C-alpha cells in the first residue's frame, strides 16, 4: 500500500486531523495538496470545498502543514489550453515512496565506552530485578519453550493446545516475576496497555549481548540496540511477502485490540466470523489469536521502536525469544496480553468443583516440607524408601492424629532441596487414583487467581481406606536439572549453541520440537521466589483431583509435566484439565477462601521463604 493511499484511508476513517498517524502528518507536510483533495472526499466534518475553510486551515497550521494554495490541487493548463499531467518522475515518487526518509529514527541512546549509559541515567546495580530478568537459564528456558511449542503447523497439525499453553506459560512467568517483586517491596507489573503516551522504562542491554546479522554467513555479530526512556509506539515499515514494504501503524494495533475485545464480548464480525463461546475448549482458539496477531505485532513494534524503518536495522531483544525477558517491557507487554485473556476467563465465572471431589481427605497439618540435607542425616545414601520410612514414623500411621512434627518452614532458596510429604486418606472401599496439584502465592495476592504459581503436579494411587504419606521430590514437574549446554559466553548470548543450531537447521519444525523436549523446563535455581531476609509469607495450597479423569504422566518421562506440552508433535497435553487448574477461573466473590471452603480434598497452610547468605548444600 502506498503512503498516499494509506493516509487517504486514515483521512476517510478519522473525525479530526489529530487522529492521523505521525506518518501521515509528515506525508501531508510535504504534500499539502493531497490532504486537501482527500478532505473534500472524506466525511471528516462533512464540509464542502469552501465551508469552514478558515477552521480547516487552522488545523493544518497547527500541525505545520503548508498553507493551502489553489494551484496545489487544480490542474494547470499550458499555453495550448491542454491539461498538464504530472511528470513521470513525480508519479513514480508517489507510487514508490521513500519510506527510509519518511520513517526517521528517534535520537538514539547515548552509551559510554564500557557499553553502559551514564550511571545517572541507568545503573544496573540499582535495578532490583536485574538479576532475575538477566538470568541466562531463564532466558534459555524461554527460548527453549518457543522451539518446543511453536505456533506454526507441520503436516496440517499444530501442537496440542498450543494457544492455551502460550497464555498459561507466560502467565506462569509473570506470576513468578511478580512474586519476586512483591518480596522486594516493589509494585506489581503495570500492563503496557497505553499505545499513545511515552513509555518511561529505558532498557540498556548488557554490553556482552550480541546478535547475528541476517544474511551474513561470516558470523559477524552486533550489539542489541538500547532504548532511552520516554519512547512511544511508532508506525513501522517492514517487509511483507514478495519483497513489498508494508506499513504497520499504531492505529492498526489499536484496531486489533478492539477486534479482540469485541470477540471476547461474544460478537462476530469479518475478522472473527465465528462466535467465541464461554467454554473451556475455546481457550486455544482465543490464545492462538492473541498470540499470532496482537502479541506478535506488538513485540515487533516495540523491538523496532528505535528503528521504525526496520529494513537493515537491528532489532532489540524484544524481537524473538532469545533474550526478551531481559527487558522490563517484555513483562509489561505480557501483563497486558494476559489481562485480555483474563477478561474472557472472568466471563466464564467461578469454577464449579462438584464434579472433581474424589473420596480423599487431607488437612492443613497434613503437609510438610523436609529439607533433603536433613533426610540425608537419616540415611546418607538418600534411598527414597528410607526417607519414606522416616516420614511414616515421624508423620504418619500411628501418629496420624498427632502433629508434633508436621511442619517446617522453607528458609532457603536454591540449591537447598526439599521433599514434599503429604498425608492422605482414601475414604472409600475402592482404590482411587489421585493427582496432587501444589501451588503457592504471596499471602497478599491469594485472592488474585492469575498470581498463583504451580509448583508441582504428580499422580498416586491409594488402596481402599488407606492412610498414607505421599512423598515427591520438589523438582519433578516444573524444574529440570541438566548439565550446562553452553559456555558462560554462550549462556550470556542466550542462544542455542552454534553446534546445536547447525544440527537443528537440518530438521523440520516438528523434529526440532521433539529433539529439544527433554530439556524443556523451568530453571531449578528459580523454582521458588527469593523471599526476603526477614522472611516472606506465602500460602501453600494442595488440591487433590480425580486422577482417573486426567492424563498426568509418570515421573519416568522427561521434560516438564506442567509447561511444555506433549513430547511428540502429535501427543496430547498430559493433563486434560485446563492449564492453570484449579486457578484458571476467577474466585467466588473474589475470595480464595470462599472458593475452596468446605472441600475435603484440599489443604492449605502458610510457609515462610527467607533469603539467607549461607545454607547447607547437598
Image (cartoon, rainbow, N blue to C red):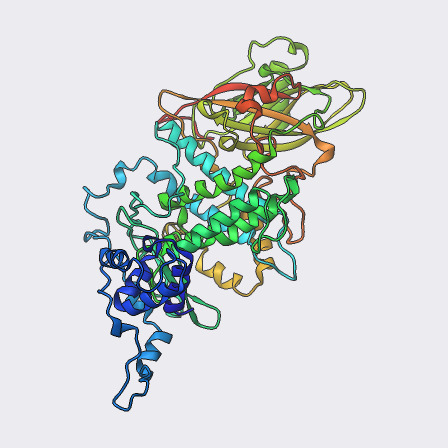
Question: Which residue lies at the image location 28% right of the left edge and 58% below the top edge?
Answer: 56
Q: Quadrant of residue 345?
A: top right
Q: Nearer the viewer, residue 21 or 218?
A: 21
Question: Which residue lies at the image location 21% right of the left edge and 51% below the top edge?
Answer: 114
In the picture, measured across the screen, residue 234 lies left or right of residue 260, that is left
- Whether 374 is drawn above or below 198: the answer is above
Q: Nearer the viewer, residue 374 or 493?
A: 493
Question: Which residue lies at the image location 28% right of the left edge and 91% below the top edge?
Answer: 80
Q: What x and y, as percent, mark residue 523?
A: 47, 40
Q: What x and y, as percent, mark residue 601?
A: 66, 21
Q: Nearer the viewer, residue 320 or 528?
A: 320
Q: What x and y, as percent, mark residue 77?
A: 28, 84
Q: What x and y, as percent, mark residue 182?
A: 39, 28
Q: Is residue 354 in view?
A: yes
Question: Which image quarter is the N terminus in?
Answer: bottom left
- Whether 243 is drawn above or below 437: the answer is below
In the picture, measured across the screen, residue 416 lies left or right of residue 3, that is right
Amino acid at each position: 500500500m502506498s503512503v498516499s493511499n494509506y493516509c487517504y484511508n486514515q483521512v476517510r476513517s478519522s473525525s479530526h486531523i489529530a487522529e492521523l498517524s505521525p506518518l501521515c502528518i509528515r506525508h501531508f507536510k510535504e504534500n499539502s495538496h493531497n490532504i486537501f483533495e482527500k478532505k473534500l472526499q472524506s466525511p471528516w466534518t462533512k464540509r464542502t470545498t469552501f465551508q469552514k475553510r478558515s477552521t480547516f486551515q487552522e488545523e493544518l497550521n497547527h500541525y505545520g502543514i503548508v498553507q493551502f494554495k489553489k494551484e496545489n490541487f487544480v490542474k494547470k493548463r499550458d499555453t495550448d489550453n491542454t491539461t498538464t499531467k504530472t511528470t513521470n518522475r513525480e508519479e513514480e515518487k508517489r507510487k514508490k515512496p521513500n519510506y527510509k526518509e519518511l520513517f526517521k529514527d528517534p535520537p538514539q541512546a547515548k552509551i559510554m565506552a564500557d557499553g553502559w549509559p551514564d550511571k545517572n541515567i541507568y545503573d544496573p546495580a540499582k535495578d532490583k530485578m536485574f538479576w532475575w530478568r538477566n538470568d541466562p537459564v531463564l532466558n534459555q528456558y524461554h527460548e527453549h519453550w518457543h522451539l518446543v511449542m511453536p505456533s506454526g503447523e507441520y503436516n496440517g497439525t499444530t501442537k496440542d493446545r498450543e494457544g492455551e499453553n502460550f497464555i498459561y506459560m507466560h502467565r506462569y512467568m509473570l506470576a513468578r516475576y511478580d512474586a519476586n517483586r512483591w518480596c522486594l517491596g516493589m509494585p506489581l507489573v503495570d500492563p503496557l496497555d497505553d499505545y499513545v503516551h511515552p513509555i518511561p522504562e529505558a532498557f540498556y542491554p548488557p554490553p556482552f549481548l550480541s546478535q547475528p546479522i541476517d544474511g551474513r554467513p561470516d558470523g559477524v555479530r552486533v550489539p542489541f540496540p538500547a532504548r532511552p526512556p520516554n519512547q512511544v509506539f511508532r508506525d513501522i515499515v517492514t517487509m511483507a511477502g514478495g519483497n513489498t514494504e508494508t506499513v504497520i501503524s499504531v492505529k492498526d494495533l489499536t484496531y486489533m485490540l478492539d477486534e479482540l475485545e469485541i470477540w471476547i464480548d461474544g460478537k462476530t464480525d469479518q475478522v472473527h466470523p465465528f462466535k467465541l463461546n464461554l467454554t473451556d475448549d475455546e481457550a486455544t482458539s482465543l490464545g492462538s489469536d492473541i498470540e499470532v496477531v496482537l502479541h506478535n505485532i506488538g513485540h515487533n513494534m516495540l523491538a523496532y521502536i528505535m528503528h521504525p524503518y526496520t529494513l537493515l536495522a537491528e532489532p532489540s531483544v524484544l524481537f524473538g525469544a532469545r533474550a526478551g525477558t531481559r527487558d522490563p517491557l517484555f513483562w509489561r507487554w505480557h501483563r497486558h496480553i494476559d489481562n485480555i485473556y483474563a477478561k474472557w476467563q472472568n466471563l466464564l465465572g467461578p469454577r464449579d468443583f462438584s464434579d472433581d471431589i474424589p473420596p480423599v481427605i487431607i488437612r492443613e497439618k497434613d503437609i510438610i516440607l523436609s529439607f533433603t540435607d536433613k533426610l540425608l542425616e537419616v540415611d546418607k545414601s538418600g534411598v527414597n524408601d528410607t526417607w519414606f520410612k522416616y516420614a511414616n514414623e515421624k508423620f504418619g500411621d500411628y501418629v496420624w492424629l498427632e502433629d508434633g512434627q508436621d511442619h517446617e518452614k522453607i528458609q532457603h532458596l536454591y540449591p537447598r532441596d526439599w521433599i514434599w510429604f503429604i498425608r492422605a486418606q482414601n475414604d472409600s472401599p475402592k482404590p482411587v487414583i489421585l493427582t496432587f496439584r501444589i501451588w503457592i502465592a504471596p499471602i497478599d495476592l491469594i485472592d488474585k487467581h492469575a498470581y498463583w504459581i504451580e509448583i508441582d503436579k504428580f499422580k498416586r494411587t491409594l488402596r481402599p481406606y488407606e492412610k498414607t504419606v505421599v512423598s515427591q521430590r520438589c523438582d519433578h514437574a516444573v524444574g529440570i536439572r541438566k548439565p550446562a549446554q553452553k559456555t558462560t559466553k554462550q549462556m550470556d548470548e542466550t542462544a542455542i549453541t552454534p553446534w546445536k543450531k547447525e544440527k537443528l537447521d537440518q530438521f523440520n519444525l516438528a523434529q526440532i520440537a521433539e529433539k529439544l523436549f527433554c530439556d524443556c523446563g523451568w530453571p531449578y535455581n528459580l523454582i521458588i521466589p527469593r523471599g526476603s531476609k526477614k522472611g516472606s509469607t506465602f500460602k501453600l495450597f494442595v488440591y487433590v483431583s480425580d486422577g482417573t479423569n486426567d492424563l498426568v504422566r509418570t515421573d519416568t518421562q522427561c521434560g516438564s509435566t506442567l509447561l511444555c506440552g506433549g513430547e511428540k508433535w502429535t501427543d496430547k497435553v498430559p493433563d486434560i484439565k485446563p492449564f492453570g487448574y484449579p486457578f484458571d477461573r476467577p474466585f467466588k466473590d473474589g475470595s480464595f477462601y470462599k472458593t475452596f471452603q468446605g472441600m475435603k480434598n484440599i489443604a492449605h497452610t502458610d510457609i515462610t521463604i527467607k533469603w539467607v547468605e549461607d545454607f547447607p548444600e547437598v
